Image: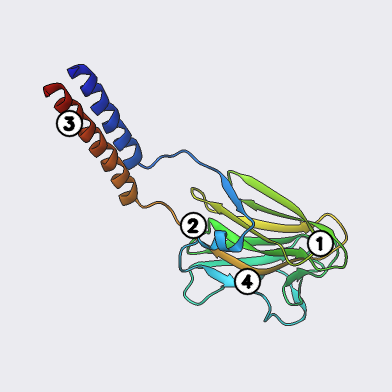
Amino acid sequence: MTRRRSAVLALLVACFIAFSIPTTARAGISVYFDPAAFASQVMPGDCAQDFTTLPEGPLGNNVSFCGSPGSQFAYSAATVDPTSGLYGDEGLSTEAFNDVLMLTFSGLLLPNAVGGNFFSDSSGPLTVGVSVDNGLDFTLVTFTDTTGIPFVGFVDFGQAFTNLEVFSNNTGYPTIRNLDVGAAVVPEPGTLALLGSALVGLGWLSRKRRFGVRQS
């Protein structure tokens, strides 16, 4: 029985080490369609921009946005067609039909949490695509813009995003509103250490109970 108890203790110690040491395995990009669920994954200090205060009309191309005061996140917006550029109309949009709205992230920190309202500023149901790229993974979400202004959020707990693109598969103007750019919440090392300590404690209690039964 001594060898068996030693094996159990060795397993518990291994679990403790596994939970305490950061892992290099990646879970990939998570997609959120609920704004509240996405917001719960974003740390304070994010860069929020609703684009509703933009002047109505042509904005040129390659426009920079610093977002909230004090935020370390920033990005620039541009279109694939440099002859058309961006357009302001209660949101950040393209001036030309079927153009692609591109965001390139910069600033002191690159975000690993990006979410906002994406739609095609035109009449009728249109298919809208939103994609994010972090240099390792590429995630594309498509949806039909029928009613309201759909929300899509992306979170990657292991890799920062480099750019985001919005496009329409039909005739329309890809548009962004209420964009939130920031850092995702990550599990604290202390939480993992507590979990490992709990496993060791459970193993000790189990061994004590078994020893007491044998002695009686």
Q: Earlier in the sequence, mark 1 or mark 3?
A: 1
Separation of residues labelled 3 and 4 (CA atoms)? 64 Å
Q: What residue lies at 64% left-to-right and 57% top-to-bottom? A: 33
Assess disc 1: are there few (<14), some (14-19) or many (≥20) residues with their C-alpha within 10 Å of its C-alpha: some
Identify the residue under disc 1.
Answer: 146
Q: Earlier in the sequence, mark 2 or mark 4?
A: 4
Separation of residues labelled 1 and 3 (CA atoms)? 63 Å
Q: Is residue 171 left or right of residue 29?
A: right
Assess disc 2: are there few (<14), some (14-19) or many (≥20) residues with their C-alpha within 10 Å of its C-alpha: many
For mark 4, give the secondary structure. Answer: strand
Tell me: residue 9, above or below residue 186.
Answer: above
What amino acid is at disc 1?
A: Thr
- How far from the left and from the top, in percent, is residue 8? 26, 25
Q: Earlier in the sequence, mark 1 or mark 2?
A: 1
For mark 2, give the secondary structure. Answer: loop
Identify the residue under disc 2.
Answer: 184
Q: Is residue 183 left or right of residue 95?
A: left
Q: What residue lies at 73% left-to-right and 66% top-to-bottom? A: 149
- 117 or 98, which lies in front? 117
Task: Kindly indicate whether the residue at mark 4 contacts the one at mark 2 (C-beta within 8 angstroms).
Answer: no
Separation of residues labelled 1 and 2 (CA atoms)? 30 Å
Identify the residue under disc 3.
Answer: 208
Which quadrant is home to the C terminus? top left
Which quadrant would residue 59 be assigned to in this image?
bottom right
Task: Kindly indicate whether the residue at mark 4 contacts the one at mark 1 (C-beta within 8 angstroms).
Answer: no
